[in-house]
């Protein structure tokens, strides 16, 4: 079973471990998550569970979002019941802000809750999120190019890339040449982050190192599949 | 909200009774040092020339002269490896960072004592 939970980045700090070493940690508010839907092999062809994180006010939610989590007596649902179709199970909770599906998550029921306790005894996790958007960025920031010299005749091109291609042959640029452009605001996964502490009482998860995105950004946390 | 959560997380790493000391104080810092399996205590004494940061990241810099050469060591205030901090002498200082002491030597390094 894939173990996972949704969360939100709270920020970074450092704590001391039992040997007195300062450990840089990211604090993640992880869960509690509601189980909104369960996918089964019979119905959907694969096994998964859909989790939702953080309540969203009803006035900000669309009708479809409200109907997804609770029975709101839609005309279609009524018609289906009249036709003798069994109603779909609903979680019966408030609409959720952040909804994601976890593959192979077995043993969960619609309306159930997933807490940070699923990571109990786990050594490391993978954390996915959306990185900070940097807008248009030059090659030094975007691709870690070295730039050019500060002196020795370099004029106004200190942060430029060097040459981009060969000469007459092949006579054109190959696709995928690293250049300046939009940087950030991409999905990224930090893999194999060590679990430092689990605070079930406050729904907090502390992992060693940085995770993608800004403070307050939504995160998907999964059991690490990296060995060793 | 997130700042409050961070504060709560840091609380577990903060020491309950940190000795009160200020910039300009002459202190003895007792640090626990692990040699193989044996633990011993090393004392570093000198003048506190700076304090920086907050929470678990709060640090202080101690400066002393060893064999005519200035030596500075930076410690985390809340580090469990610090056994204790003893204040030996307090002095009158008029700024938060005493970096000007680096340029001085001999008698001019002395700071005026503050009687408490």
Image (cartoon, coloured by chain):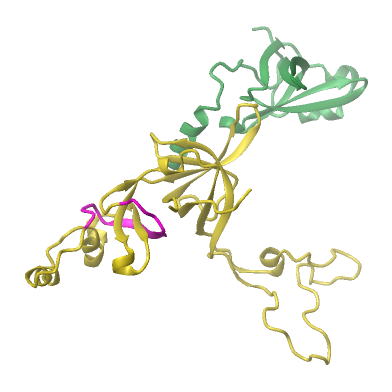
Q: Nearer the viewer, residue A74 or A78?
A: A78
Q: Nearer the viewer, residue A160 or A41?
A: A41
Q: Position of residue A63 (x, y in %)?
A: 21, 66
Q: How many marks?
A: 0
Is residue A26 within the magenta segment? no
Q: Position of residue B61 (x, y in %)?
A: 73, 27
Q: Colour of chain B?
A: green
Residue at the far front in the pictured view: A42
The image quadrant where one finds the C terminus of chain B is: top right
Residue at the far left in the pictured view: A82
Is residue A104 within the magenta segment? yes
Q: Position of residue A21 (x, y in %)?
A: 66, 31
A202 in relation to A95, above or below = above
Residue at image point 40% right, 36% down: A200
Q: Nearer the viewer, residue A116 or A214?
A: A116
Q: Colour of chain A?
A: yellow
Residue at image point 77% right, 16% down: B42
Q: What's the magenta region?
A: A90-108
Residue A225 visible in rendering: yes
The image quadrant where one finds the N terminus of chain B is: top left
Residue at image point 24% right, 58% down: A69
Residue A132 visible in rendering: no
């Amino acid at each position: 079973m894939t173990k996972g939970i949704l969360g939100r980045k709270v920020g970074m700090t450092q704590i001391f471990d039992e040997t007195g070493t300062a450990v840089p940690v990211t604090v993640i508010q992880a869960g509690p998550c509601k189980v909104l839907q369960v996918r089964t092999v019979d119905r959907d062809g694969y096994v998964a569970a859909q989790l939702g994180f953080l309540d969203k006010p009803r006035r900000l939610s669309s009708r479809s979002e409200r109907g997804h989590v609770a029975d709101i007596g839609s005309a279609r649902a009524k018609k289906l019941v009249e036709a003798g179709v069994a109603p779909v199970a609903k979680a019966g909770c408030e609409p959720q802000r952040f909804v994601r599906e976890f593959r192979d998550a077995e043993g969960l029921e619609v309306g159930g809750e997933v807490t940070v306790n699923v990571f109990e005894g786990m050594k490391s996790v993978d954390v996915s999120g959306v990185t900070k958007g940097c807008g248009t960025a030059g090659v030094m920031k975007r691709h870690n190019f070295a730039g050019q010299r500060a002196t020795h005749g370099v004029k106004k091109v200190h942060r430029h890339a060097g040459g981009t291609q060969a000469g007459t042959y092949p006579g054109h640029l190959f696709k995928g040449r690293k250049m300046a452009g939009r940087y950030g605001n991409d999905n990224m996964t930090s893999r194999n982050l060590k679990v430092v502490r689990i605070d079930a009482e406050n729904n907090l998860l502390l992992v060693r190192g940085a995770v993608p995105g800004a403070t307050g950004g939504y995160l998907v946390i999964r059991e690490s599949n990296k060995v060793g | 909200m997130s700042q409050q959560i961070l504060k709560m997380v840091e609380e577990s790493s903060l020491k309950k009774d940190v000795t009160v000391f200020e910039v300009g104080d002459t202190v003895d810092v007792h640090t626990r040092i692990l040699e193989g399996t044996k633990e011993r205590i090393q004392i570093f004494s000198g003048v506190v020339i700076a304090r920086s940061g907050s929470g678990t990241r709060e640090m202080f810099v101690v400066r002393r002269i060893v064999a005519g050469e200035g030596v500075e060591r930076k410690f985390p205030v809340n580090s469990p490896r610090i056994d204790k901090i003893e204040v030996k002498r307090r002095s009158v200082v008029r700024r938060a960072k005493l970096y000007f002491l680096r340029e001085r030597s001999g008698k001019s390094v002395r700071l005026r004592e503050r009687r408490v």
